[in-house]
Amino acid sequence: MDQSSLDSIANNLDIKYQVTDNVAARKSYIAKVILTNTGDVPLKGNGKWAIYFCHIRMVEPLTLPDADQICMEKYGVKFCHINGCLFTLEPLKSFKTLKKNDSLEITFTAEYYSVARSDLMPNWYITCKDLIPRIIQSTQGEDLNYILPFDTPESWKRHKWDKYDPFSQEVRYEKNHVDDLGKAGSLVTPIPYRLTVVSDGTLDLSKQSWCIVANQEVMEEAQFLKEKSDSIKLNLQNNQDLKLEQNHVIVLKIGPVTVNSEECKESDKLDAYELIVKLEEEVIEVIGSSAVGVFYGVQTVLSLLEGCEVPHVHILDFPRYSYRGMHLDVSRNFHKKESVLKLLEVMAMYKMNKFHFHLTDDEGWRLEIPGLEELTSVGSRRGHDLEEKTCILPMLGSGPNFDTSGSGYYSVEDYKEILQFAKRRHIEVIPEIDMPGHSHAAIKAMQARYCRFQEVNDVESAREYLLTDFHDSESVTTSVQMYSENSMNPGLDSTYKFVDKIVKEVKDMHAEIMPLKTFHFGGDEVPYKAWKKSAACEKLIENGDVESFDKLMEHFVKRLAEVVAKHDLSLGAWQDGLIHSGITPVERTKFPNEEVLAYAWQNVWESGLAGFAYKLANAGYKVVMSQATHLYFDHPYEPDPEEVGLYWATRYIDTRKTFNFMPDNIFANADVKLTGKALSREDIEKCNEDNDILTEKQNVIGMQGQLWSELVRTSDVLDSMIHPRLQALAERAWHKAPWEEIGDVNKLKKDQTADWTMFSNSLGYKELRRLDKMGVAYHIPPPGARVEGDKLHVISAYPGLPLCYSTDNGTTWLDVEESVQVKPGDKIIIVCKSADKLRSSRRMTLTVPGASLSK
């Protein structure tokens, strides 16, 4: 095969993928790959070609990955597992040539289940020895049209016990139905601690020349307010010389804010502010306990603005939690600096103050580290280099080239710009360098560095930062994500030298802008068996440095903690990084760090792990509630095959589920099993068999949303997965709802619904419009619909968003008013629009009449 033939095949090989049955077997599903040659160049069996594709479920799990390959003589092909999610489909000698219009249908099994289009990856590619790999055009791009519809229960259900079906319009109508208030439910999001509407009067900031008066301590906040006012053409002026008794001024100052509430912890008082609108004096006064409090008061002023008018209110406000965070993974797929800055801007609008920056993982290293250039020259790039000497493997559908979201990194200057941007908005950046697991990119980069120095016979430099023991057999052990060679070796001194180098360089980047406080090392999902045959680890045990193999992880974490403490930093970790052997947390006193932050994420109810959040807090760790069932924004908004998202923790997480989360009472959030079956009282008791009770409440310091980016390849999808769930997260992290204290379930649900009605109206009538102006492509839920007689009623999840319908298959669109006149036989397409009408939800189609509404 020559290059032109390969190019032709890549352009003309039509690939289809179909999930045919998830329910027949317990832990595997049946799928088909259909190859059709639509071109003139035949696909021959003796061509020595290989099709590379990413598949997040193990193919033929009874054989792979233990064997190198599985031959399927029936089809004349074999599957090979390369590493992680990367597989090949290659011809055997028995492969029958595919001539023009010939097809080959290959049926195979894969592990677990697949119930959504986004489970599959784009950019399959074909290559042949010494030829340039080419992406197979039928699989290229984000539409994923090569995947056939999930249109049967066997394809959209995970197993025979699965109770989930895609929502019909009728189900969505019932689920989304709340009162349309015709306006925002609250003046400010998140809701302030105390907001008093003094009168129905307003101050119009456009009628006079208004000025901002601020002293030097809060000039940054004054300048921020001026810039924001300029963007909405208010044209406020900064003037330090004006006297405070003048009118038409917005006064920003630091001063005492009296908070007589047991709910306000000492750590939160610095964030407190008071906002007073003085109607007669024509003055707006913002008093903060600190510059941070003043900044939050400024954000409230901006939120209060309706056009150019500010209502006559008096606000006293402070946060529920000192830690109000959002996590972003830029390793699995890289996201440019501009996307990060936009996220930080929105976080600041809603008074969120911690940005957990997940910078490294198996699939990529995203931060330049001076002196370790291979981390970015190799570790930040994904492409077709099977030896991983110049780049790492093309995981997650990034393809053979370097021009996709698989490749990219932040230079030192980029990172400093992000820090500066965050600092101005009083957001602390918490960098995460994931280790010892999830470290494939770092490991391969340091191996490339090793080879560079070996070539010049500099053995000492070659081994200086090596992360793997060449004498172990780790490659036989795979991680949860099917990776081999993804764990730093805890028996090598060079591992800890690498850690020290990274911590020092990251700390130096922060030093002049935002002194680093916390270094997050990940610590999650470590395949401990990877170290079983490491000579370096065996030596640790033989020398008595580690008492047993089971203590290797604890040894690593303790040594790492010592390195981090040497740099005067607190330590952050996912909960499993601090709970070894799966039973109890590591004794807190074993860590020399002033604080150790534990991010509690493992709460699949049946797993029995939800109570570890309490165990960690009671053991002295500072706990950040990060529960996967409510706060993992990589999960879909609906149990629908067309919604983007993973679903290992729960089948879906809509905005309302995040809004309803009660961080003070973990088990009050237990709702359904993974199957969708409602949890009984007995089931919930089993979820907490250890009877975990939170006794050290002061150690729960906040909550955080997470976006893992395996399926997030574009900035629009990034926005959609985060917003408006982030707004619901911000509401819960800043404001404790009265219904959270209600014990009676019926009363709780009634009050939750009333509060959600207010919040969803605020989204539809106000907050999403603010996001539109910022270019944030938030998620738009499909509408719900119901036919009653000759009327079609359509509603959105967020009242106030425009609804449109079409009766001519989408050629023309009309606005939905109160209802739509319909007649039998009408085929109607309905959509929900963004507030600015520039974007639409997924299209829903229904036919009238009929008792059922088809999707």
Image (spheres, grey):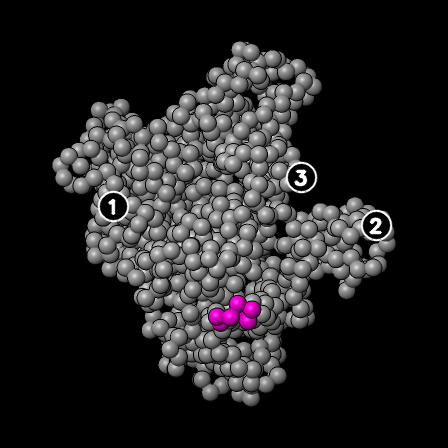
Mark 2 and mark 3 in contact (Cβ < 8 Å)?
A: no
Calculate the distance from the C-alpha at mark 1 to the C-alpha at mark 3. Answer: 48 Å
Task: Determine if the magenta segment contains residue 301.
Answer: no
Residue 850, position as x, y percentages in the image? 80, 50
Residue topped by disc 3: 151
What is the quadrant of residue 667 in the picture? bottom left
Residue topped by disc 1: 554
Tell me what residue is drawn at x 56 percent, y 44 percent: 161
| Kind of residue at disc 2 | Asp
Badge 3: few (under 14), some or many (20 or more) residues near its Cα, within 10 Å? few
Residue extending farthest to the left is 543
Residue 798, position as x, y percentages in the image? 63, 62
Calculate the distance from the C-alpha at mark 3 to the C-alpha at mark 2. Answer: 23 Å
User: Viewed as shown, does residue 739 lie left or right of 786?
Assistant: left
Region in magenta? 742-748
Earlier-in-chain disc, 3 versus 2: 3
User: Viewed as shown, does residue 106 lie left or right of 413?
Assistant: right
What is the quadrant of residue 231 in the picture? bottom right
Task: Determine if the magenta segment contains residue 746.
Answer: yes
Q: How many labels does the image show?
A: 3
- Front position in the image: 141 or 61: 61
- Front position in the image: 645 or 418: 645
Vertical order, 212 against 78 (above or below): below
- Front position in the image: 546 or 184: 546
Calculate the distance from the C-alpha at mark 2 to the C-alpha at mark 1. Answer: 66 Å
Residue extending farthest to the front is 682
| Kind of residue at disc 3 | Asp
Mark 3 and mark 1 in contact (Cβ < 8 Å)?
A: no
Vertical order, 111 against 755 (above or below): above
User: Viewed as shown, does residue 16 lie left or right of 71?
Assistant: right
